[in-house]
Image: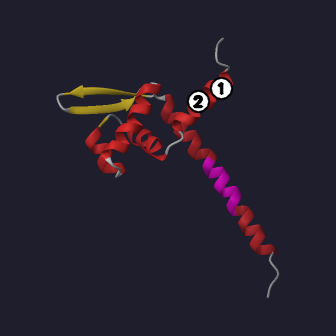
Amino acid sequence: MPVPLYEAKAEFFRMLGHPVRIRVLELLQDGPLPVRDLLTSIEVEASNLSQQLAVLRRSGIVTATRTGSTVVYELAGGDVAELLAAARRILSVLAAGSQELLEELRAAEPVR
């Protein structure tokens, strides 16, 4: 029995649900990067980065190419960059809404 689309989407978003994975995807938007550059930019333990890269690679969202001892990662397609941009837009709207609510609450506070 095939997996319903909503379950597949939920699994996809779970796969994205780690800060290191999101940061990797953000960095790879500008082009392929070797693991050493990802490590420098993200500042996590090499084993942690390796685990997160493995999740991204297994999902097919990134690809890895080995040249000698250097492994270079890149996004498997441009849709990931579009998804991250959409997330930024959504978060900006949510943050703006929260800020407006906060300002309204502050304005409604009684003066002491």
Viewer-nearest residue: 22 or 97: 22
Q: Quadrant of residue 97?
A: bottom right
Q: Is residue 50 left or right of residue 87?
A: left
Quarter that holds the C terminus: bottom right
Question: Residue beneath label 2, please?
Answer: 11
Residue 105 coordinates in the image, percent (x, y): 77, 69
Q: Residue at x 54, y 41 (%)?
A: 17
Q: Quadrant of residue 3?
A: top right
Q: Position of residue 89 (x, y in %)?
A: 60, 45
Residue 57 is situated, as x and y percent measured from the top left of the image, at 40, 28
Let me know if residue 110 appears in the view. Answer: yes
| Mark 1 element type | helix
- Cα distance, mark 1 to mark 2? 6 Å
Query: Which residue is at a point 61% across and 49% down the rendered structure image?
Result: 91
* Kind of residue indicated by mark 2: Glu
Residue visible at 41% across and 38% down?
52
Determine contact: label 1, label 2, CB under 8 Å. Answer: yes
Asked if the stretch drawn in magenta spans residue 95, the answer is: yes
Q: Main secondary structure of the magenta part?
A: helix
Whether residue 88 is situated above or below residue 102 in the rendered picture: above
The dot on residue 65 is none
Q: Which quadrant would residue 8 be assigned to in this image?
A: top right
> Can you name the residue that lies furthest to the left here?
68
State the SS at label 2.
Answer: helix
Between 108 and 55, the residue placed more toward the observer is: 55
Q: Is residue 17 left or right of residue 66?
A: right
Q: Which mark is residue 7?
A: 1
Residue type of the residue flagged with mark 1: Glu
Q: Is residue 100 magenta?
A: no
Magenta segment boundaries in residue numbering: 91-99
